[in-house]
Image: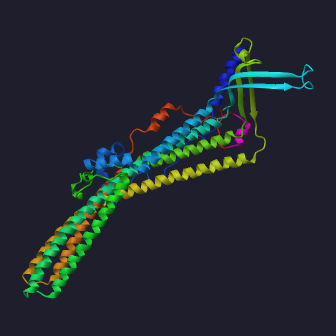
């Protein structure tokens, strides 16, 4: 009978220790439409449905330019902000393991010696005596038996906070890859703009020299020469401005990479960079739920649920146990002799009778959960808006590029005709200057739209969750972690603590 009782007691302890008061998790509804926006600006969305999802396409498969790939690899290795994110993950993992170890007893070894004189007035023998005592113990000190899941709730919270930190690192990696690619593309665009400004300056200087010669021989006026000088000076200003922008672009790229980028890795013209593949936004907006920042917000929401479980468990008794086994003797050499075996155990429980802080703490945890829900839904709304903006850009930039190319061709023809008419003396030089100015602006606009198209592809890839690790350390950590059962002990007072409690 004694063995059965002990077995039943052991099973009861295991079952109760596996229970928690964490509310049953229900994923909040996404406060966004189920489908992506449609309309004139999104007509290109359906054409990419057969393309791979961004999360299925690694960043090396998306950025196929070898120099850009190497630059991104350098950024992932050297960027200090990403390094801080990685270290935050390591810290969160260590904190989680510390909290998980709270469930298990801490076994300590201890030893001590006492030597004292007992006066005759308090001595049992009526005479003074010298007392010696030596002990050597192995035991557990104040191990809280987690009957109501307080420690397991805190463990669950630490786990979810660790997972949230891991998702934050993945978000930081996506952001770093996108920012590095955009900085690389911006540098290429400004270098192409500088080449355009330099070629325009050379052409304007040639025109200026020709007009000055024509003025010297009396074929044109000083007004034409002054007008030609204005275009030369404007081109010189652009050359200086783009030279400055290129230096700033290089500084920005070096900061993202975390080290100076070698010259052989820096881009040339924008048109020399390999094209980027299309990615699909998915059939519905549910694909957003796999974005790292949304997974981070969801983990923080689950951590808030676990915090509620810990606050509920604080209303119930805390049971702790202190025990030790070892040897004791009045002689140091007698510690290891027969008959010196000693043991002790001291169970203790603390039942809160009146503590007004407990109800306030429970209320605070429930409010924190509502905050976490709002933040989770807000993250989904921000993500939906980012994807919708990127899709709108993808649906309209193609038309802008086509119109801009036509505009450049028309301005080239207008400049050719105006210059021919001026050389024949049938037109004034002011019309030639207007045609040159329009052509130069159209060529700059073409570079800007080409950059916008590439940046839009990078943005769409990033906002759809592309660029993160396909397998994360959190996944392997979760497989090693047994799931926490959201079961609560049956108790009349438990119903008064929260409406969403469950019975054992």
Reply above or below: 189 against 6: below
**Nearest the camera: 246 or 496?**
246
Q: Position of residue 457 (x, y in %)?
A: 31, 54
Q: Is residue 50 visible from the viewing direction of this image?
A: no
Magenta stretch: includes residue 493:
yes
Q: Among all residues in the image, which is located at the extreme top?
A: 338
Which quadrant would the N terminus be assigned to in this image? top right
Q: Position of residue 221 (x, y in %)?
A: 13, 88
Give the residue displayed 29% in from the left and 69% down from the top: 241
Residues shaded magenta: 490-497
Q: Position of residue 298 (x, y in %)?
A: 51, 46
Give the residue displayed 47% in from the left and 44% down from the top: 87
**Nearest the camera: 91 or 13?**
91
Which quadrant would the C terminus be assigned to in this image? top right
Which colouring convention does the figure follow?
rainbow
**Image-based side of 38 in relation to 120, left or right:** left
Magenta stretch: includes residue 89:
no
**Nearest the camera: 129 or 158?**
129
- Counting the numbered discs, the total is 0
Give the residue displayed 61% in from the left and 43% down from the top: 307
Give the residue displayed 62% in from the left and 32% down from the top: 103
Reply above or below: 356 against 445: above
Reply above or below: 455 against 6: below
Please, what is the dominant secondary structure of the magenta stretch? helix
Q: Position of residue 205 (x, y in %)?
A: 16, 75
Reply above or below: 181 against 92: below
Q: Quadrant of residue 182?
A: bottom left
Q: Is residue 156 visible from the viewing direction of this image?
A: yes
């Amino acid at each position: 009978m004694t063995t059965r009782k002990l077995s039943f007691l052991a099973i009861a302890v295991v079952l109760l220790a596996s229970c928690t008061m964490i509310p049953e998790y229900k994923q909040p509804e996404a406060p966004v439409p189920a489908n992506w926006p449609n309309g004139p600006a999104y007509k290109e969305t359906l054409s990419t449905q057969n393309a791979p999802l961004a999360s299925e396409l690694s960043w090396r498969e998306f950025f196929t330019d070898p120099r850009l790939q190497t630059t991104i690899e350098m950024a992932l290795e050297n960027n200090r902000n990403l390094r801080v994110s990685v270290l935050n993950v390591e810290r969160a993992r260590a904190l989680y393991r510390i909290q998980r170890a709270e469930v298990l007893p801490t076994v300590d070894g201890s030893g001590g010696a006492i030597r004292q004189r007992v006066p005759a007035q308090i001595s049992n023998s009526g005479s003074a005596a010298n007392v010696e005592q030596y002990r050597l113990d192995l035991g557990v000190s104040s191990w809280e038996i987690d009957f109501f899941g307080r420690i397991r709730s805190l463990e669950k919270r630490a786990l979810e906070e660790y997972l949230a930190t891991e998702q934050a690192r993945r978000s930081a990696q996506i952001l770093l890859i996108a920012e590095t690619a955009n900085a690389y593309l911006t540098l290429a665009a400004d270098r192409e703009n500088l080449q355009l400004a330099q070629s325009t300056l050379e052409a304007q200087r040639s025109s200026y020299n020709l007009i000055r010669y024509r003025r010297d021989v009396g074929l044109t006026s000083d007004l034409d020469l002054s007008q030609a000088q204005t275009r030369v000076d404007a081109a010189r200003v652009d050359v200086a401005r783009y030279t400055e922008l290129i230096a700033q672009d290089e500084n920005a790229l070096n900061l993202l990479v975390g080290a100076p980028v070698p010259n052989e890795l820096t881009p040339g013209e924008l048109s020399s960079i390999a094209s980027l593949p299309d990615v699909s936004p998915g059939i519905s907006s549910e694909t957003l739920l796999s974005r790292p920042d949304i997974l981070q917000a969801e983990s923080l929401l689950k951590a808030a649920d676990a915090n509620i479980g810990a606050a509920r468990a604080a209303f119930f008794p805390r049971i702790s146990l202190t025990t030790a086994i070892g040897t004791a003797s009045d002689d140091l050499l007698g510690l290891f002799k027969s008959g010196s075996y000693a043991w002790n155990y001291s169970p203790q429980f603390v039942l809160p009778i009146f503590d007004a802080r407990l109800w306030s703490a429970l209320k605070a945890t429930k409010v924190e959960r509502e905050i976490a829900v709002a933040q989770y839904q807000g993250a989904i709304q921000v993500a939906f808006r980012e994807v919708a903006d990127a899709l709108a850009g993808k649906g309209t930039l193609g038309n802008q590029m086509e119109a801009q190319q036509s505009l450049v061709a028309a301005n080239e023809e207008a400049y050719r005709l105006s210059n021919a008419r001026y050389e024949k003396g049938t037109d004034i030089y002011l019309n030639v200057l207007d045609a040159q100015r329009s052509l130069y602006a159209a060529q700059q606009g073409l570079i800007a739209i080409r950059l916008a198209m590439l940046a839009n592809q990078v943005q769409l890839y990033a906002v759809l969750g592309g660029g993160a690790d396909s397998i994360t350390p959190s996944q392997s950590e979760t497989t090693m972690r047994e799931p926490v059962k959201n079961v609560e002990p049956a108790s009349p007072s438990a119903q008064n603590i929260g409406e969403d409690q469950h019975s054992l």
